[in-house]
């Protein structure tokens, strides 16, 4: 009697293990198919491209830092773009996040509308936004900042609203019971709870913005990316590698500052 | 000072929290709502400051009418009504002082509270902490305090509102029996000294008999006993609420 039911349990276990294995197997098949579809298994292309890759690598080494003075201003621009973009993103994300969190949103319709808006904003890549803003406000750092901010509102707003959604509701009830208005509840019972997470998201986003703004220069939206594009166009690959190394150095610095801020603001 | 008039509460999931009930609460008393979990204590307590809206009936203040007459009337009523919760409802990463200051928010406009509150409110909050013996813990994070201390901060937050009425929902249910007596004693002393009316829900008969001026027994969402502790049957030594709950039912009959 007992052994029969044990057999039953083991049979169930085998079935669920098989289901798991089947799922993993299908995922692997999909990945292989995607690699095949994109030409990864075409050995000839790799063999034929060998000399080109060799040529490129030899031209990139040693890196040519001869023009470093002319890169300082663009690097500074890129840094400024990342900071300005983050500041703008925070200012617009916070109110939108409050509208997009079910526990602070005034109405379900508003909640759905703002969530949709955020999803839309983050689904447009910043490089596309960069092209559009360059067309709208002209070359320079400004279109870059606007592109970063607008795309990030979609991302940061979502992260903020998720943090707000998961606050402990008990202190909110306490504030409400003490006669606080909805706005006072948000400022004094919701925000103090999520401040560490909001700070974390914001600093992470700033680090990301620095890397992203380096790319934005490519479409004419200011910063070091513009220099990178120029070097690529002129086939100065030794300068390209030098610029990439400069960007890398700055990314390391920005990430360290970010890590420091995260530690101290905890 | 406060009366519940034919109040009935049916929750959205269909559960009846409170059957049609009418009760009066008199000024200056320490009133205990006694009953097992699910008896309707929390529901009744929460309708008294509008955290739960009655499906039928009304809650009225003597001479001022319904607490539900408008949003601002409800907020005014809540401002005069401190609340102490079972799980203290503090914000763990804020200091005890910052938590107590939540009790001062309603005294100011939303805009004013964007800036730090004035010194006199901070002093008021510190005095409230001092009343529960925690002035020296004012700058400790709430989550670094013990369970009993956290509940004392909860009491200080209610006291800082300078309320006429304090509602306490199972304020000592999460504490060990000895701490429970101390914390409830603090609440009782403060209400007595400051002339604050208290309505406290409990499930421990011994605590109710020890502190209450008046006991309201609840079972299955209705009032089954109302009177002085001395009238509350002959089970004074029975501290086990499971054993006492049938008595509550008997009291109804």
Image (cartoon, coloured by chain):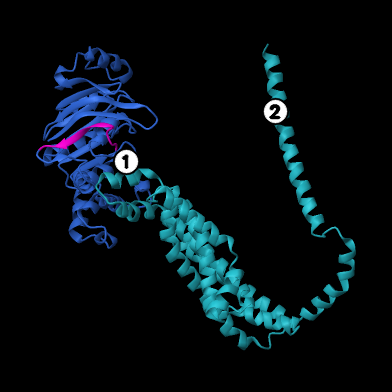
Of circles 1 and 2, the one toward us is 2
Q: Residue at x 40, y 60 (%)?
A: A95
Percent position of residue B22, x then y: 19, 26
The quarter of the picture where the C terminus of chain A appears is: bottom left
Evaluate whether residue A114 shows in this view: yes
Q: Which residues are magenta?
A: B52-62
Q: Which residue is mark 2?
A: A13
Mark 2: secondary structure: helix
Which shade is chain B? blue
Evaluate whether residue B130 shows in this view: no
- Name above or below for residue A7 compared with residue B9: above
Q: Which residue is mark 1?
A: B88
In the image: residue A58, left or right of residue B40: right
Give me the C-alpha separation between circle 1 and circle 2: 44 Å
Label 1 marks a residue whose chain is B
Determine crowd level at label 2: few under 14, some 14-19, many 20+ residues with C-alpha closer than 10 A: few
Mark 1: secondary structure: loop
The answer to which quarter of the image holds residue B146 is top left
- Name above or below for residue A156 compared with residue B203: below
Determine crowd level at label 1: few under 14, some 14-19, many 20+ residues with C-alpha closer than 10 A: many
Which shade is chain A? cyan
- Name above or below for residue B227 compared with residue A70: above
Q: Residue at x 85, y 58 (%)?
A: A41
In the rendered image, residue B82 lying in the magenta stretch gets the answer no
The answer to which quarter of the image holds residue A122 is bottom right
In the image: residue B210, left or right of residue A140: left
């Amino acid at each position: 009697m007992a052994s029969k039911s044990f057999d039953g349990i083991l049979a169930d276990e085998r079935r669920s293990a098989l289901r798991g294995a089947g799922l993993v197997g299908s995922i692997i098949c999909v990945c292989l198919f995607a690699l095949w579809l994109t030409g990864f298994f075409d050995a000839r292309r790799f063999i034929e491209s060998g000399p080109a890759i060799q040529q490129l690598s030899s031209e990139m080494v040693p890196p040519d830092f001869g023009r470093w003075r002319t890169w300082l201003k663009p690097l500074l621009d890129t840094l400024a773009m990342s900071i300005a973009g983050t500041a703008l993103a925070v200012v617009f994300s916070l109110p939108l996040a409050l509208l997009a969190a079910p526990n602070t949103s005034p109405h379900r319709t508003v909640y759905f509308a703002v969530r949709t808006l955020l999803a839309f904003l983050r689904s447009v890549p910043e490089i596309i936004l960069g092209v559009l803003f360059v067309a709208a406000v002209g070359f320079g750092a400004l279109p870059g900042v606007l592109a970063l901010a607008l795309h990030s509102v979609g991302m940061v707003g979502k992260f903020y609203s998720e943090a707000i959604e998961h606050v402990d509701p008990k202190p909110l009830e306490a504030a409400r019971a003490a006669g606080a208005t909805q706005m006072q509840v948000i400022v004094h019972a919701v925000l103090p709870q999520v401040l560490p997470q909001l700070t974390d998201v914001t600093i992470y986003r700033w680090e990301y913005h620095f890397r992203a703004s380096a790319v934005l220069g490519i479409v004419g939206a200011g910063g070091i990316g513009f220099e990178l594009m120029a070097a690529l166009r002129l086939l100065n690959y030794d300068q390209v590698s030098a610029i990439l190394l400069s960007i890398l150095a700055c990314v390391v610095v920005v990430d360290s500052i970010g890590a420091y801020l995260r530690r101290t603001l905890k | 000072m406060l009366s519940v008039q034919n109040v009935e509460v049916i929750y959205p999931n269909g559960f009846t929290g409170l059957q049609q009930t009418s009760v009066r609460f008199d000024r200056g008393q320490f009133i205990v709502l006694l009953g097992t979990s699910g008896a309707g204590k929390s529901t009744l307590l929460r309708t008294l400051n509008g955290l739960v809206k009655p499906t039928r009936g009304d809650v009225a203040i003597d001479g001022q009418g319904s607490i539900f007459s408008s949003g601002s009337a409800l907020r005014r009523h809540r401002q005069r009504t401190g609340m102490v919760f079972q799980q203290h409802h503090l914000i763990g990463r804020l200091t005890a002082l910052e938590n107590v200051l939540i009790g001062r928010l309603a005294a100011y406009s939303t805009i004013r509270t964007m800036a730090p509150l004035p010194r006199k409110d901070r002093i008021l909050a510190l005095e409230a902490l001092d009343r529960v013996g925690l002035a020296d813990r004012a700058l400790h994070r709430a989550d670094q305090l013990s369970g009993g201390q956290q509940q004392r901060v909860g009491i200080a937050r209610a006291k800082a509102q300078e309320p006429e009425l304090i509602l306490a929902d199972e304020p000592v249910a999460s504490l060990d029996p000895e701490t429970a007596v101390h914390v409830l004693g603090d609440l009782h002393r403060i209400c007595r000294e400051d002339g604050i009316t208290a309505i406290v829900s409990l499930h421990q008969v011994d605590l109710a008999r020890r502190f209450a001026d008046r006991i309201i027994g609840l079972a299955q969402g209705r009032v089954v006993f109302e009177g002085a502790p001395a009238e509350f049957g002959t089970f004074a030594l029975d501290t086990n609420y499971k054993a006492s709950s049938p008595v509550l039912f008997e009291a109804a009959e």
